[in-house]
Image (cartoon, helix red, strand yellow):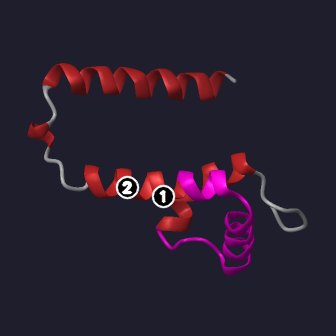
Amino acid sequence: MFRRRRLACQQVVELVTEYLDGAMAPARRARFERHLAACDGCTAYLQQFRTTLAVVGRLDVGDVPAPVMAELLAAFRSWADDRRDG
């Protein structure tokens, strides 16, 4: 899929969970890490993602008030719908 070209920032964003899960093929991982080495924005995004995972990983379902959970779910559904339509 990305064999002959460098990864663009949008591709890095889309692949970040695969990277953090350790599920990325070695060649793609190397391209991903080369992009990070040259892109401060993507490096910052990766760090923000890691921080978010660390914080969210400490939450229990009951820690999030029902109205906040409903708002978060609505925002996610809207985002997912926009991605599907766009």
User: Where is residue 2, by image quadrant?
Assistant: bottom right
Badge 2 marks a residue whose secondary structure is helix
Residue on which the image places disc 2: 51
Residue lying furthest bottom: 26
Amino acid tagged 2: Thr
x%, y% of residue 33? 67, 71
Predominant secondary structure, magenta span: helix
Tell me whether circle 2 and circle 1 mark residues in contact (CB < 8 Å): yes
Q: In the image, residue 41 lies at what x, y percent?
A: 64, 51
The residue shown at (47%, 68%) is: 21
Using a 10 Å C-alpha cutoff, classify the residue at mark 2 as few (fewer than 14 neighbours), some (14 to 19) or many (20 or more): few
SS at mark 1 in the image: helix
Does residue 63 lie above or below 53 as drawn? above
Q: Residue at x 22, y 24 (%)?
A: 68
Side of 39 relative to 43 (left or right): right
Q: How many marks?
A: 2
Please identify the residue farthest to the front as the structure is shown.
Answer: 40
Residue denoted by label 1: 47
- As measured in the structure, the alpha-carbon distance from the residue carrying label 2 to the one carrying label 1 is 6 Å
The residues colored magenta run 21-45
Q: Is residue 58 left or right of residue 23?
A: left
Q: Of residues 40 and 72, which is closer to you in this image?
A: 40
Q: Which of 50 and 74 lies nearest the eye of the viewer?
A: 50
